[in-house]
Image (cartoon, rainbow, N blue to C red):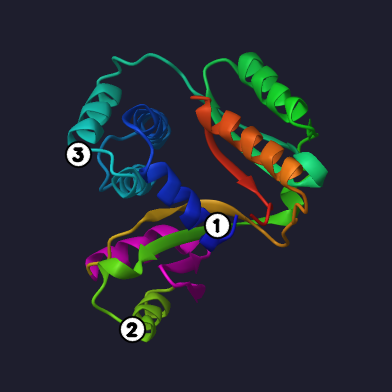
Amino acid sequence: MSGHNKWSTIKQKKGKNDAARAKVFTKIGRELIVAIKTGGSADPNVNSKLRDTIAKAKAANVPNDNIERIIKKAASDSDSTNYEAVTYEGYGPSGVAVIVEALTDNRNRTAGEVRHYFDKFGGNMGAQGCVSFMFNQKGVILIEREDLDKDEDAVMTDALEVGAADFEADDDIFTIYTDPEDFSAVREELEKLGYVFASAELEMVPDTYTKLEDEETAAKMQKMLDMFEDNDDIQNVWHNWEE
């Protein structure tokens, strides 16, 4: 999704009720657990993946107490659940390319649910690699204009000087792109300069976008995305729908 469309999605999520926000917290909590178990340390100073996930949690307004409680629990091994990272690919209505990233403790259950969501709304789940060639992984950092006392040129200069690959400006948001290997360093340098992020994570960014011309098809696409979002196993959904 483009930076602009992503920002619209973030604003919608922030405006949702407590139950919806709790679901976001649950998903990020699962990411924190996996970051600790795969990174081998509950110390963000030595575990870069954990550092990135904590930054993502803070951007999503997860309370610090929640973050600390999850880290402590994962570090003590009191949570014995093992989550597996799985990626699914497929097509939504009218051939919209979709990538679904999940963390699951039951691969068969999640695969069945993802396939059902694709089928229910006029899409289909495909083989690994069927759409991922249309995307590139990039670090994507969003900064709200209203949070800043700097103008567009100053923000762009700061971003490029700390190693960003590209910069875009919309009416409400600045979007900073990085190469995947530079993401952590750029994010940390921008934090040191006092920037606060609306979002900061590695994303799958499409090369081209698909426009849905009729309202019925667009409604099906949105319902499919809502189903994915409502599933606790599904962490991220990337697509090339030009909303």
Can you identify the residue that label 2 sits on? 154
Q: In 3D space, how far apart are the residues under numbered discs 3 and 1 (Cα atoms)?
A: 28 Å
Measured Cα–Cα span from mark 3 to mark 2:
30 Å
Sequence order check, earlier mark of 3 and 2: 3
Q: Is residue 215 above or below residue 233?
A: below
Depth check: give the residue in front, 85 or 209.
Answer: 209
Please state the horizontal and vertical placement of residue 212, each as a whole percent of the image: 75, 52
| Mark number displayed over residue 5 | 1
Instruction: Please name the amino acid that badge 2 sits on.
Output: Ala
Q: Which residue is mark 3?
A: 64
Looking at the rendered image, the disc whose residue lies closer to the viewer, 1 or 2, is: 1
In the rendered image, residue 153, in percent from the top left (x then y), is placed at: 38, 86
Q: Which residues are magenta?
A: 164-193
Q: Is residue 242 magenta?
A: no
Residue 34 shows in the view? no
Whether label 3 touches label 1, CB < 8 Å: no
Q: Secondary structure at mark 3?
A: helix
Quadrant including the C terminus: bottom right
Give the percent coordinates (x, y) of residue 181. Answer: 49, 59
Residue at x 74%, y 56% (from the top left corner)? 211
Residue pictured at 26% horizontal, 66% vertical: 147
Q: Is residue 48 left or right of residue 236?
A: left
Residue 77 figure quarter: top left
Q: Is residue 112 left or right of residue 6?
A: right
The answer to which image quadrant residue 119 occupies is top right
